[in-house]
């Protein structure tokens, strides 16, 4: 089988875990498994780290790396990986612009290009994602949408794949991205072998269960801020828009309009998100039943709240507790089971 050339595009802003993680994952595909089973080594990828220059780079963590190649070396690659830059995105810098041009050139030459976390900002700046589905870290949804309105952003997805352009969600999604690319470029057997060796589950393609409801309190609307505080202080009971309208001295129509403009959510949607967020916090920390949690948050109809939870979080309360509390429902007393 042909050995494919992988280029990991490093910069001074990179999170090096998203450089070395993919480097190690690709370099051992066809190697680690074969060593374990005493088979001939069949490396599938030739991996290089490329920078704007070949000089040593200091990353955000203070760690240092010396690239193997420069973008001016004019090499061709089969895969180009764009690592995460954390929250330190600098779209007006020359470094950013030069890397964007390089990614676009590599794609024009036939390379598959893929980003990790905030690397999606560089990928989107090329225009390659316009009209296509993409993902990035859920906390960066608002700035990404503002910067790239033509991209169909879906931060529920862990991996978004549009032809030869892929984007991955958070930093640790680099593993899922590598598994998908190994499966795509080699075959499923090699991907499964790699997954077994590295203990990576590559069957999940959702980051919705990791997302946290981001509350906007910087909008400057005092009436909406009062309502937001009132909702947060009264999560244990049913809160109606009529109550909030009286509380804020506004009509229900005006309140809904102002609230949606300030927070991007209708009042009832906002209340539901906040109550589900509180339910998540309780499930993470305690072993009380979901029936108890539902009633604690003002939902007498437990089935409705369970469906709402699953719709907003992406998994059931039972599965969420297993993921983030480590408690299996069959280990709870009978009265406390979901």
Image: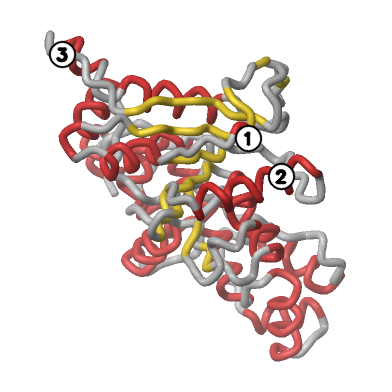
Q: What label does residue 38 carry, if any?
A: none
Q: Which badge, 3 or 1, comes first in the chain's sequence?
A: 3
Q: Which residue is mark 1?
A: 71
In the figure, 36 relative to 332: above or below?
above
Q: Is residue 231 visible?
A: yes
Q: Secondary structure at mark 2?
A: helix
Quadrant in which residue 37 is drawn: top left
Q: Which badge, 2 or 1, comes first in the chain's sequence?
A: 1
In the figure, 237 relative to 83: above or below?
below
Q: Which badge, 2 or 3, comes first in the chain's sequence?
A: 3
Q: Secondary structure at mark 3?
A: loop
The residue shown at (66%, 43%) is 99
70 to the left or right of 21:
right
Q: Which residue is mark 2?
A: 98
Q: Is residue 209 visible?
A: no
Q: Which residue is mark 3?
A: 40
Identify which residue, 179 or 218, lies in the foreground.
179
Q: Alpha-carbon distance for marks 3 and 1?
A: 34 Å
């Amino acid at each position: 089988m042909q050995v494919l050339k992988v280029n990991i595009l490093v910069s001074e802003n990179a999170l090096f875990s998203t450089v070395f993680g993919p480097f190690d994952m690709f370099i051992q595909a066809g190697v680690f498994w074969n060593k374990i089973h005493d088979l001939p080594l069949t490396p599938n990828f030739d991996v290089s780290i490329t920078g704007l220059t070949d000089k040593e780079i200091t990353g955000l963590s203070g760690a240092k790396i010396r690239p193997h190649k420069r973008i001016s070396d004019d090499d061709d690659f089969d895969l180009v990986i764009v690592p995460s830059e954390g929250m330190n995105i600098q779209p007006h810098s020359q470094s950013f612009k030069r890397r964007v041009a390089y990614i676009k050139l590599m794609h024009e030459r036939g390379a598959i290009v893929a980003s990790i976390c905030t690397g999606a900002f560089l990928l989107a700046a090329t225009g390659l994602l316009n009209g296509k589905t993409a993902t990035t870290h859920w906390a960066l949804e608002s700035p990404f949408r503002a910067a790239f309105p033509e991209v169909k952003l879906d931060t529920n997805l862990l991996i978004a794949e549009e032809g030869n352009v892929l984007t991955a969600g958070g930093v640790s999604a680099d593993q899922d991205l590598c598994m998908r690319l190994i499966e795509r470029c080699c075959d499923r057997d090699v991907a499964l072998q790699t997954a077994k060796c590295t203990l990576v589950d590559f069957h999940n393609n959702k980051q919705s269960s990791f997302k946290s409801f981001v509350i906007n309190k910087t909008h400057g609307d005092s009436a909406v801020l009062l309502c937001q505080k009132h909702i947060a202080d009264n999560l244990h009971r049913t809160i109606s828009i009529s109550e909030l309208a009286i509380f804020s001295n506004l009509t229900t129509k005006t309140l809904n309009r102002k609230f949606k403009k300030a927070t991007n959510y209708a009042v009832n949607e906002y209340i539901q998100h906040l109550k589900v967020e509180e339910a998540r916090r309780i499930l993470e920390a305690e072993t009380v039943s979901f029936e108890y949690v539902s009633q604690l948050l003002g939902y007498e109809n437990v089935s409705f709240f369970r469906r709402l939870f699953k719709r907003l979080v992406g998994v059931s309360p039972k599965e969420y507790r297993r993921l983030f509390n480590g408690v299996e429902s069959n280990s709870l007393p009978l009265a406390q089971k979901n």
